[in-house]
Structures are given as C-alpha cells and as structure tokens.
Amino acid sequence: AWVHGDPRKVIYPTDSYGQFCGQKDTLNENKTILFYFNILKCASPVVLINLQCPTTQLCVSKCPDRFATYIDVQASYRYKPDQWNYFKQFCKPGFNNPRKSVAQVLRDEDCPSMIIPSRPFLKRCFPDFSTKNGVLTVANQTTFKDGRGKTRNVTDLREAANGINNVLDARSVGMKIFEDYAISWYWILIGLFIAMIVSLLFLVLLRFTAGVLFWIFIFGVIGIIGYGIWHCYWEYDHLKGIPGSDLTVYDIGFQTDFRVYLQLRQTWLAFMIILCVVEVIIILMLIFLRNRIRIAIALLKEGSRAIGYIMSTLFYPIVTFILIAICISYWAVTAVFLATSGEPVYKVMANQTLCKYANMTCDPETFNTTNVTKLCPGAQCTFAFYGGESLYHKYIFIFQLANAFVFLWLVNFAIALGQCTLAGAFASYYWASRKPADIPLWPLFSSFGRAIRYHTGSLAFGALILAIVQLIRVILEYLDHKLKGTQNSFTRFLLCCLKCCFWCLEKFLKFINRNAYIMIAIYGKNFCTSAKEAFFLLMRNVVRVAVLDKVTDFLLFLGKILVAGGVGVLAFFFFTQRIPIFAQEAPTLNYYWVPLLTVIIGSYLVAHGFFSVYAMCVDTLFLCFCEDLERNDGSTAKPYFMSASLHRILGKKELSPKKA
C-alpha cells in the first residue's frame, strides 16, 4: 500500500487529463477547484464526486461568478475583449482562438457552451442555488441560456445536481454548529470536568452506598409489582357485573384495538396471576440468594476501597484510549493508501450516443493515432477513475481484509493489555496481608511492566482468537449486505443463524479472555492454562457469578445515568440561560442542543471510562475471593486474605492471623 498508494487521489480532485488540481510544483498549483464543462450531463452529486461525469473536467483557480455563453462571448470578443479574457480561463489550457466555429469548439469541447454562477463545494464548482420567495434561483435568475440556442429553467440545473441544495443547506447548519462549538467549547470542558468529579465521588462513596442503593431498588421493584397486583385485582373486581366483561379472549378473537381486551375480567386476572408469579420468584430469590447478594455488595464496597488506595488506576483508560487511537490512525492511513493504489483509467467520452467505442478504455498518448476520432467525431480519451487489472489490483480487497484483521488484533491487544494491567494492580491489593501497608509501591506501573515484559505473548494470543471471530463477523455482515437483494430464503436464514452464533461466540470469548487475563496477572501462567482455570473456577461459583454480574451491572448503569443525567440537566439550565446567577455568562447559541448533547454524551463516556476500571476491579477481586476460598481455610497455616466484612458474611467468628 505504501509503495503503490497515493493519498493525493483523495485529497485533490483529478481533471480529464489525470492531473491533480492544486498539487504543488505543477501547472495546476494555483488551480485547486474542478470545473465541469456541462454540468447538465451530470446525473447526480454521486456521479460528480466519483469523477465519472461524462463531460470535460478542468482545474480552475475560481468558479464562475456570472452567466455567459460561448456564442455571446465569441460574437462580442472584438469590442469586448474583457469578456473573452474572463471566459477563456474556463477553456482548455492554451486555447485562444475565438474565431473557431462554435460547432467545432463544442464538438472538440475546447470551451464550455455556457458558464453559470457557481461556488466551490468539495473542491468542485456547483451551481450557486438560492431560494427567493420560495422560488429556486441562481444569482437571482430563474432562467439561463444553455449556449446551444435554448433558454432553460434553473430547475434543470437542480435536477442535474440533485440533492446539492440539501447538502449546501446542511453545510450552512454545519457552520452554525461549528460556531456554537467555538463559542461554548470551554463550558463543555467544564461540564466534562464536573462529570469526572461526580464519577470519582460516586465510585469512592460506593463503599458506603452500594448496599443502600441496591436494596432501595429491590424493595422499590417489589412495591411496584405489589401495586400492580392490587390494581389488577381492583380492575377485576370493578368489572364484575358489567355486561360483556365475562367474555373470554377466545370469544372476541383478535382485535386491532387492544383497549377492547382491557374491558375483560379475564385479561386483568391473567395480568394479576403473572405479576403474582413474578413477585413470588423475586421474593424466593432474595430469600435463597440473600447470602450471595450480601457477598456481591461486600465485593462492590471492597472494590471502591481498593480504588481509593490505588487512585492512579482511574486514569489508565487514557493510556488505552491513546493506544486505540494509534491503531485507528494506522488502519485508516493504510486503508487510504490501499484504496488509492489504482492507476489512472481513461475511457472514451463521445458526444454521439451511438458511438460503439463509448466508455471503452483508452490510452491518451496513442488515442489521436487511432480511428476512434474518425468514427466518432469529437470523441476524447479522458480520465475516468483509478483502478487496474494487475495481480496486485485484483487482490486489493483481500489486502483491505488483512488490514482490517490487523486493526482488530491490535485493538484487542490494547484492551487486553489494559485489563491485565488493572487486574495485576487490584490483585496486589487483595493478596496483601495488611491493607494498605503491604500493597506494593506503584502497583499500577509494576503491573504494567509485568504485563509488557512477561505476558505479551499470552495477551496477543487471546487478542488473536477474538480478532479471528470478529473478522468472520465482518465478512458475514459484508455477505449479508451483498445478498440483501436475493430472494433465496434459505441463504438469508443461514446467514442470520451464522451471524447470531458468531455474535454469541464473540461475547463468550470476551468473557473468557477477561477472566483469563486476570488469572495471567495473578499467577503468570500462559493463556490457555489461565483460561481453563478461570472457566472452571467460575463454573464452580456460577451462582455467585450471576448475582455479582447483575448487581454490578445495575449499580454501574445507575451511576452512568446519574452522572450523564445530572450533568445534562445542569447543562440544559445553563445553556438555556435559566440559572439567574450565570445568565449573563451563558453564551448565545444558534442551537443550544449542540453543546448540550456533547456534554451528555461526553459525560456518559467519561463515566464509562471510570466505571470500566471499577468493573475490572470487582471482577478481579471476585476471582481472588473464589481462589482464596479454595486455597485457604482460615486456619493459622492457611489464613484468608479477604477483608473482615467478607469474612463476617461467610459466617466466620474472627479473622485468623495472616502470614505474608
């Protein structure tokens, strides 16, 4: 890619001669914009952007700013030379023969038949559309001369450049959004800083509030379901004696108006039974799993305490972010080089629709020596696109897949490195005999050094397995996209099943890899051994895993909503100038929702970054806890390393003295 690719093909537009517009040290250095001789031949903006519009394309320094036709300019060039001097800058380089007949000029496409007021967009000249009193105009005119003896409406230009006006309107909105960001960027940063402080406080305070938040939620759910049962019974009793209420669902059949079913006693009886069953299940789960729920809450509190001792872990996601940004940059640059690896392809552009050579590939150096120009007068060999027929060009798609695979592998490795580093830091906290006295100095940096020095191969192997599955998913999505138009139901069903299976496999592998990296950080064994030991350890504690997972997910979700929602409400009142104290400080915006959405989404991502560290902490402490229970029995010879609160929940009378 780096040998054959040329990003200039993306950066600069290319004229009909295969030359870049605006490239330094060339004749087009000061001609940065692409001009189309006859934009009416262009069907849509997609055709224009792909450089496949069937008209001559020329590099110019600026777009036309007036209406003019070649016929009018030629007729008046003797006594109005300024008009000709202006018009000829849009003709082919070196053409300066206004005496040449109009028919020959248009046949050879030496000059455009007309120019219209335009403005640059995507480095290409497009008609300068505007709306006046609801009427589409170009330079305040609704008609124009096409240079071939006809007067046409500007709507013809609109049809030729379908959608350009919408894109230009979108650009106007984009400029307003950019202005809003320019005015409010420092307030957005303040909002994100507040989100960071709130996230940090939430994690630190979880050691005191985890149990309270969880039980408030559980009893709230029980209360809501209880109210639902009472309401269903009230509706059931209220409908007693009302004509038609004793009918069954089967009697009335299927109805599009579902309110009909709410007039039946049977409906409310069914709702009441379902809610009663759910209520009983929840209560029974609380009774039989109460000890495991207490362990889960204790582990959450212990995780908050561990983060309090190793605060540097909260900022490790910045390292992961930088590594992933490097991976994305490498992938994107290589993908651009691959995509621009093609050679210029030239095709015959003929004015005659019946020319048999039209759209055939040609060589511009030998084109004038062929008989194409004789059989198709006015035909030209112009640049069409970048491509090629060599072995290298045929396998560019395979190279793009390989590039995508490397990207997935590197990203998964960066994530694995972060997980192993954090796991090592938190494991050093758990296995410390006296906390925090025995916690090693700089536990995060020590863990990062061990991961890089000893565990790189294991992390790369785990990332490789996950990258292979993800690549298969990418290929399946590509095939599904390509086969969307097919009517083969079996093929669509098979693809759907495969996509579902590999999605499940990816989720399972992520779960296994995460716990394998924890075991690698604790014991330093290879990936396969660590994955096996982690899997069987979790299976021996499967109920605890399920309970801890759900309790952790709930509390972290609650935290993310609390942070994003709280900061979002504050930002809403600020940007809408509803806080009297800061009313004068709030910036005047075009769209207040621009910084508001940025603050909300940014706050959620900030909270997610902090809470991902917390989730890794809890998972690490849980595996250490399970290992502690299996390796030790609390005796003097084999003391537990768990905290006093966990020890009390397990029903032990006192902690045995620990040995280093």
Image (cartoon, grey):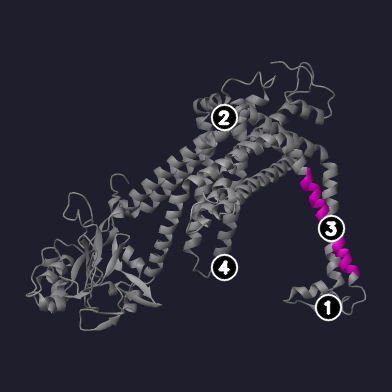
Residue named by callout 4: 489
Q: Position of residue 637 (x, y in %)?
A: 76, 16
Q: Nearer the viewer, residue 614 or 274?
A: 614
Q: Residue at x 84, y 42 (%)?
A: 288
Mark found first going from the N terminus, 4 or 1: 1
Residues at marks 3 and 2 touching, judged by CB atoms closer than 8 Å: no
User: Disc 3 versus disc 1: distance between alpha carbons?
Assistant: 29 Å
The numbered disc on residue 251 is 1
Residue ID at (62%, 26%)? 523
Q: Is residue 226 magenta?
A: yes
The three-letter code of the residue at mark 3 reads Tyr
- Name the N-terminal-most of marks 4 and 3: 3
Looking at the image, is mark 4 or mark 1 nearer the viewer? 1
Range drawn in magenta: 215-237
Query: Left or right: 367 with respect to 465?
Result: left
The residue that label 3 is drawn on is 227
Q: CA distance from mark 1 to mark 2?
A: 67 Å
